[in-house]
Every structure is written in structure tokens, then in C-alpha cells.
Image (cartoon, rainbow, N blue to C red):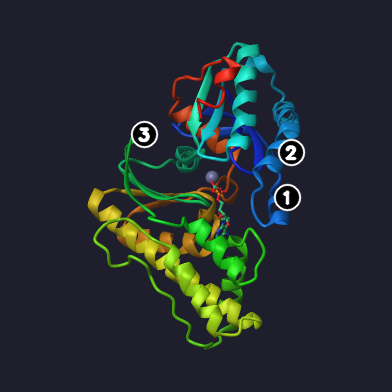
Amino acid sequence: MILAIESTFDEIGAALARSNTIGGVEIVASCIASSAAITAKYGGAVPEVLAREQVAMIIPVIEECMTKANVSKDNIEAIAISYGPGLVGSLLIGVETAKTLAYAWEKPLLKVNHMVAHVLANFIHKDKIPCFPAVGLVISGGHTDLVHLKELNSWSLLGSTRDDAVGEAFDKTARILGLPYPGGVLIQKATQNWRTRKSVGLGIKLPRPMLGSENLDMSFSGLKTAVVDLVSKVEIANEEVIEEIANEFTKAIVEVLVNKVKKAIEITGSSDFVLAGGVAANIHIREALVEAMTAEGVRCWIPDFVYCTDNAPMIGAAAVLRPEPANFDLRPESSLEVI
Ligand code: KG4
Ligand code: ZN
């Protein structure tokens, strides 16, 4: 059993994970302490404030997770830590704690890339797992990457955003519309409201950036700029207009993502598609991709909602499936160099 720790942004998570008989991952226990309310209060991450919270939370979260599963250090084979990408202060808390525990308990230390872990959250299943070759789409607050998963250990990047990540576009657009941070889920709510209204609205249109481009790269900052332009021309004090803009924004994102994923499936000849990252929690994106992949005869995998946004189980899943050798130097003075 692996003890996995996640501390890349505004949460501290601990999970106990092990492999199951179908080649997937079983999560034995998971605990999380979130500082999302602090991030929301400041309208974004304040790294030093988050790191101070995380220092206080990390040991209690690990202890709670182990108590919940009724396991001691003797049941743990290795400690896995998400080493990045993420905020340096938050990473430092997690990495130093993991290194110290590994040293004191004499366990191997496994390093896990946070983005790889988002994708491998799709293997937390008890009766079925994705097959290779597959196409992966990671959509989070900081990344938007299309990946070709030839095998479990052989991945290559097919395309990326050239500017804003999809999550960033959601959060920035929400802010422009006067919705609080984090805006992704509020844009989703506004979109749902619009779709139940069945109003014709103002006929608002937003661009679909790089939809027609030959390559698999994407771009979302122009979409955000188009929303800025729009709100300088229309009155957004009206809830119905906000909802109409949110709906059109969601449609633009969905259209671009579906188009790029379909192209990636065609180029790679993949049988499976895996969606990952915090924005994979968006119901409109989930529905559209399931529909598009079903129409193409491609199996579509999307993690449960709790495994989309940052979580420790996905770090456990990556450590179980692709254990990278420990290469952290245990000398404390080198702590930041390893990140
Ligand atoms: O993967 P994640 O938890 O953290 C990063 O690694 O970045 O992703 C966070 C992002 C944020 O931008 C947040 O607004 C977005 O995921 N998000 C959503 C939804 N839930 C979270 N975006 C759209 N719709 C949602 N339901
Ligand atoms: Zn993440």
C-alpha cells in the first residue's frame, strides 16, 4: 500500500492506494484539508498564506487518513509525493514532509508528476480500465494539453494551449462577468440556468479560437478578450445577459475541445479517450465529449467528480501504476533543487 501526498495548490491531501486485480487502482482511504475558502477570500492564490495553512494541516491530514484505514507505518510500502507543477511554497511543505517521513520510516520515496496523476485518475476503477493507445486531454487551472498515451509508460504531447489554460479562461471570464473566484463552477451554473430559461436572448456570439487550424494547439485568451469587448458594449447588470454570455462561452470552449479531441483520435488511431483535470468536472464538457466519442465508436473515460479537481488519490494511482524511482536528495539544503 502506498501513502500518497498532494500539496501543489490550496489543498493538502493524503490517500492510501494499492493495485487491484484488473490492473487498476483501489483507494483504501483519502483525507483532504482545503484552503479554497482562503483563496476565494483573496480572489486568487496568495502562496505564502496557503503554505502557512498547509504546514499546520499536513501531519493531521496524514494521521487522519491512516487512522481511517486502520493502518500503521508497517503497512506502508512507499511514500509518493506530487513534486510539481504547482506553487513552490505548497510543494515545499509536501515534498519536505514526504522526504522526512520516508527517511524516518525507512520507506522508498516516489515522485509523481501532478499532471500525469490527473490523467491516471482514470484508472481508479474496480471493474474496468482504459486501454492503449489512447488520447488524453488534461484541462486544469494551469494546463491544457492533448497527449498521446501509446502505452502506460510512453506518452507524447500532441498539442497545448498557446496562452491561457481552459480553467484560467473560465476563472477570468467569471471575474469579467462579476462572478466570484473560482469561477468555473459558477459559469457552469449560469449556463445551466440559461438552458432552462429557453429565451432567445440577444443572439450573443463569441469566437472559436484556432478551431480551423491544422495542428492540435489551442488558444483561449482571445475568447476572454472577446468577453471583455462584449461587456463594454452590453449591460451585464442583468442576470439573463450574464447567463447568455456564460452559455455562449461554454459552447465555444466545448466546440474547440471536441474538435481537437476528434482530430487527435483520428491522427493517432486511438480506441480510448481519457479526460482529466479540474475542468473535467464541468458537466457540459463531460456530456459533449461522451456524446462525440460515442458517435466515433471511441471509449470515453472521465474520472468521478472527486478525482477531477486536485486530490491525493490520483497521486496514489500514478505511484501504483508508474512508480518513478526516488531521486530526491535527502539532504535538507537541496530541498528546492529537486522540484
Ligand atoms: O485541476 P485543478 O483542480 O487544479 C489545477 O491543477 O489547476 O483545476 C482547477 C480549475 C479551476 O480553474 C476551476 O475553475 C476549474 O478547474 N473547475 C471548473 C469546474 N470545476 C473546477 N471549470 C469549469 N466547470 C467546473 N465545474
Ligand atoms: Zn491539478
Say which residue label 2 marks: 53
Q: Earlier in the sequence, mark 1 or mark 3?
A: 1
- Residue 276 position (above or below residue 253): above
User: Looking at mark 1, is its residue's CB closer than 8 Å to ligand 1?
Assistant: no
Say which residue label 3 marks: 152
Say which residue label 1 marks: 38
Q: Are marks 3 and 2 in contact (CB under 8 Å)?
A: no
Q: CA distance from mark 2 to mark 1?
A: 10 Å
* Residue 137 spot, x, y in % from top left: 40, 50
Q: Tell me the kind of residue under disc 3.
A: Leu
Q: Is residue 196 visible?
A: no
- Residue 1 position (above or below residue 159): above
Q: Residue at x 66, y 47 (%)?
A: 46
Which numbered mark, 3 or 2, is in the foreground of this view?
A: 2
Q: Tell me the kind of residue under disc 1.
A: Ile
Q: Quadrant of residue 288?
A: bottom left
Q: Tell me the kind of residue under disc 2.
A: Glu
User: Looking at mark 3, is its residue's CB closer than 8 Å to ligand 2?
Assistant: no
Q: CA distance from mark 3 to mark 2?
A: 35 Å
Question: As drawn, is 280 to the left or to the right of 89?
Answer: left
Q: Earlier in the sequence, mark 3 or mark 2?
A: 2
Q: Are marks 2 and 1 in contact (CB under 8 Å)?
A: yes
Q: Quadrant of the N terminus?
A: top right
Element type at mark 1: helix
> Which quadrant of the figure shows ligand 1?
bottom right
